Image: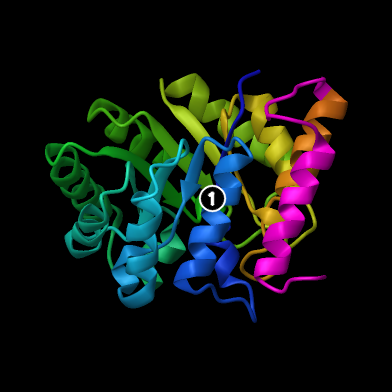
Amino acid sequence: MDVNIVDTTLRDGEQKACIAFGIEEKVKIAKIIDDMGISQIEAGIPAMGGDEKKGIEKIVGLGLKSKISAWNRMNIKDIDNSIDCGVDIIHISVPSSDIQIKYKLRSKREWVVNNMKRCIEYTMNKGYEVTIGLEDASRADINFLIELCRDVSSMGVKRVRYADTVGILYPRRIFYSIKKIKQEVPIEVEIHAHNDFGMAIANSMSSVEAGAKFVNCTISGIGERAGNCDFIKFLYCLNKIYGKKIFYGNIQELTDKEQLIREIINYYE
């Protein structure tokens, strides 16, 4: 059972109410997360510009062991902003549920597929590693998700993110969905769980059982609305339930580093 952590504290974590990171805070947090042995840090959204973009550029310039990724909407302007930052991985979020396609994009599936392919081709031609986010996957037609996965796999994309954007998943359902994708398409799957029903950790565990090798976590589970999968708690569950140790040091050492981050952002819940 291979599991890799993608830490999204600096992106989704910052979307928690009453939390905002300055440039130096972002840099300090990134250094600590890297020191925890996490394989990938989602550093933010370059298209926001200003201090957000400057912070990402500074993190990239640190030369950390962790790969640095940036989150992008499905458009070339966003992607160019990420290229400006020199990140390792460009993540492109693709609205995949019919409700988002209709009401958020005011479009149709065909347009989504064509624009997604255009963005992937553009980014890969620039020499960047691309990951694709299946935004609102938990409300999407599984057959359309499989179609999208086949399309991106055929273009050389190695990993997709199954995003429970609105936090409605439960373990049995996510197990079935990821298992189905893995059976149909030769592609790695990453789970992005929200904690609206208090099941972000359980859903992430179930995803790993189904074959997902990448798990999105945040420090202390901070994130939009009810938050995301809690990094320390997820690792503890993985260790106690499966006997799997995927981190350097011990839980206490990681907890001490987590506390340093909590102090930086004045988070004491």
Binning the other alpha carbons within 10 Å of mark 1 as few (below 14), some (14 to 19) or many (20 upward) gives some
Find out whether residue 268 is within the magenta segment. Answer: yes
Residue 45 percent across, percent down from the top left = 38, 63
The residue at the point 32 percent across, 59 percent down is 57
The residue where tag 1 is placed is 31
Left or right of residue 182: residue 235? right
Which quadrant holds the N terminus? top right
**Which scheme is used to colour this image of the protein?**
rainbow
Q: Report the magenta residues as a range.
A: 242-269
* Residue 113 position in % (x across, y down): 25, 47
Q: Is residue 129 visible?
A: yes
> Which is more toward the observer, 143 or 266?
266
Query: Mark 1 is on which residue type?
Result: Lys
Residue for point 78% across, 30% down: 238
Q: Position of residue 230 (x, y in %)?
A: 73, 51
Q: Residue at x 59, y 47 (%)?
A: 33
The quadrant in which residue 197 appears is bottom right
Magenta stretch: includes residue 249: yes
Q: Of helix, strand and loop, which one carries label 1? A: helix
Q: Quadrant of residue 172?
A: top right
Q: Closest to the observer: 203 or 77?
A: 77
